[in-house]
Image (cartoon, grey):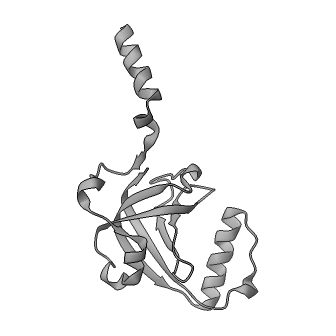
C-alpha cells in the first residue's frame, strides 16, 4: 500500500506529469511529422480540407470558454486559429506562450472589411483588449484549423 501511495505521489509531482497536456483522442505527434504555421500560410490552398499536423507557438487563448487558441504568425501573415466546438476541448489560458502540436484540417474563411472589423472587435472583447475599428483598413482571410487532437508542451 505504501509503495502504491509513493508511486502515485511521485507521478503526480514528476516533471513528466505536468510537462504536457493532450486533448482529443490519443495521437502520436512524434511519428506524424508536422509542418509549421509559416509553411501552411505560405501555401494554404495545399493544406485545405486534408488532415495534417501543424506545430506552433500559442499567442492567444479564448479566455471565456477555452474553445480556441491562436498560433503566432509573422506580422504580414493572416491569423491562424485552432477552433473547436464549445466544450469539446477546453484549452487553458496558461497555454499562452507554449509550443503545441495539433492534428486536424484547415478551413479558409475570406472576410469582407466589415466582417473583419466585426470579427476583430469580438475577439478584442473576448480578450479584454481595446479595439479601434478605424485602424482596420484591409479585409482578412481567417484560416481556422479544426483539430481532433492537440498536444501542448
Q: Is residue 124 left or right of residue 103?
A: right
Instruction: Please state the horizontal and vertical placement of residue 50, each as a whole percent of the image.
Output: 28, 74
Q: How many marks?
A: 0
Taking the spot 46% from the left edge, 53% from the top edge, the residue there is 89
* Furthest residue in direction left, as rendered: 31
Q: Is residue 105 left or right of residue 130?
A: left
Instruction: Please state the horizontal and vertical placement of residue 120, each as a whole percent of the image.
Output: 64, 77
Q: In this view, does 21 lie to the left or right of 74?
A: left
Instruction: Please state the horizontal and vertical placement of residue 48, each as a whole percent of the image.
Output: 34, 79
* Furthest residue in direction top, as rendered: 1
Q: In this view, does 114 lie to the left or right of 133?
A: left
Q: Quadrant of residue 149?
A: bottom left
Taking the spot 47% from the left edge, 65% from the top edge, the residue there is 83
96 up-or-down from 82: above or below: above
109 up-or-down from 88: above or below: below
Taking the spot 56% from the left edge, 56% from the top edge, the residue there is 96
Taking the spot 44% from the left edge, 64% from the top edge, the residue there is 56
Q: Quadrant of residue 12?
A: top left
- Quadrant containing the N terminus in the rendered view: top left
Instruction: Please state the horizontal and vertical placement of residue 101, each as a whole percent of the image.
Output: 38, 58
Amino acid at each position: 500500500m505504501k509503495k502504491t501511495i509513493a508511486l502515485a505521489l511521485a507521478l503526480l509531482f514528476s516533471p513528466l506529469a505536468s510537462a504536457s497536456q493532450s486533448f482529443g483522442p490519443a495521437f502520436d505527434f512524434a511519428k506524424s511529422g508536422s509542418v509549421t504555421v509559416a509553411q501552411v500560410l505560405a501555401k494554404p490552398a495545399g493544406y485545405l480540407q486534408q488532415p495534417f499536423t501543424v506545430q506552433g507557438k500559442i499567442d492567444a487563448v479564448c479566455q471565456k470558454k477555452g474553445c480556441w487558441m491562436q498560433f503566432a504568425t509573422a506580422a504580414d501573415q493572416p491569423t491562424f486559429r485552432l477552433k473547436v466546438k464549445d466544450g469539446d476541448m477546453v484549452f487553458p489560458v496558461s497555454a499562452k506562450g507554449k509550443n503545441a502540436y495539433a492534428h486536424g484540417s484547415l478551413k479558409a474563411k475570406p472576410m469582407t472589411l466589415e466582417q473583419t472589423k466585426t470579427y476583430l472587435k469580438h475577439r478584442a472583447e473576448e480578450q479584454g483588449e481595446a479595439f479601434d475599428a478605424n485602424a482596420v483598413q484591409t479585409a482578412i482571410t481567417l484560416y481556422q484549423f479544426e483539430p481532433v487532437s492537440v498536444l501542448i508542451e
